[in-house]
Image (cartoon, rainbow, N blue to C red):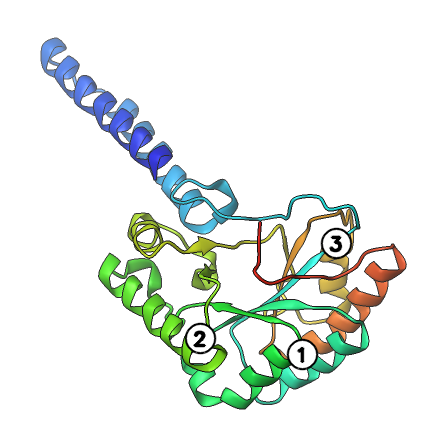
Amino acid sequence: MLKYNTLKYFFWGICIAAILYSFYKQEVYLFFYLTLILIWLIYITVGAFRMRAAIFLPSVSSLPHASKKNILITFDDGPHPEITPQILKILKQAQATAIFFCVGKNMDRYPDIVKQIVAEGHLIANHSYNHSNLIGIYSTEKVKAEILQTEETIIKQVGSSLKLYRPPFGVTNPNIAKAVSVLNMKVIGWNKRSFDTVSKTKEEVLKRITPDLKNGDIVLFHDTNTLTPAILADFLLFASNKGFIFEVSSPFEV
């Protein structure tokens, strides 16, 4: 928030100075004003849709390098009654653990799958309660309510919460930043996004996420997409052949 607020005040300072200068010179510098507005719109758009830019809030997009070559596997949007169990089977076969950023309402629908996720050594984290397409225009109080409702569900079903949060769609803004700060949540992002929900083939996804693998990468998948189990199996095999492991410990420290 400090970065955003500092630049916001700087931007408005320039605007006010430019307007006063225009009155003094009795000229309108339309191109200059339009350029300022365009720069500001680009800045807040990048901040909203690129969490790694850390314009509105800090987030963890990669892990500190460990002595072993470790990749963190993460899943969003579940649990799903059919796909999540397939994912769990593949993870078990690969001796891999992961973080599942669950949607609260899905946890309430499928509590047995949540129990299975935890029983098999994986972590459950917060991905809002409804995963609304309108999260980007929610008030701070509404964002807080979404997070808190999911935290209550996690505590009820898991027993405790690690207070890890991943905003739906990776969208951030000042309202989300304030809600996260007030609730003392840690935001977890990624540095390798599979786009498995929009890609049409397994090969397309693997081509995107397998190059330049490195220790500490955080990979984003979705355990709600029919392609993902096959993608995951091939990715884990590829990465393990490169000497990587897939570990997450509890409590999760980054």
Q: Give the residue pinned by disc 3.
A: 70
Q: Secondary structure at mark 2?
A: helix
Instruction: Give how far across and how far down residue 108 sits, in percent.
Output: 43, 86
- Would you call the spot at circle 2 few (<14 residues within 10 Å), some (14-19), or many (20 or more)? many
Q: CA distance from mark 3 to mark 2?
A: 26 Å
Pointers 3 and 1 in contact (CB under 8 A)?
no
Q: Which picture quadrant has residue 150?
A: bottom left
Residue at the spot 11% in from the left edge and 13% down from the top edge = 26
Name the foreground residue: 135 vs 106: 106
Give me the disc on residue 183: none
Q: CA distance from mark 3 to mark 1?
A: 19 Å
Q: Give the residue pinned by disc 2.
A: 154
Q: Give the residue pinned by disc 1.
A: 120
Would residue 133 appear left or right of 230 to someone viewing this image? left
Residue at the spot 10% in from the left edge and 10% down from the top edge = 24
Instruction: Give how far across and how far down residue 156 sits, in percent.
Output: 41, 80
Q: Which picture quadrant has residue 176?
A: bottom left
Dot 3 amino acid type:
Asn
Q: Earlier in the sequence, mark 3 or mark 2?
A: 3
- Would you call the spot at circle 3 few (<14 residues within 10 Å), some (14-19), or many (20 or more)? many
* For discs 3 and 1, the disc positioned in front in the rendered view: 1
Q: Which picture quadrant has residue 229?
A: bottom right
Name the foreground residue: 195 vs 115: 115
Residue at the spot 73% in from the left edge and 82% down from the top edge = 89
- Count of marks overlaid on the render: 3
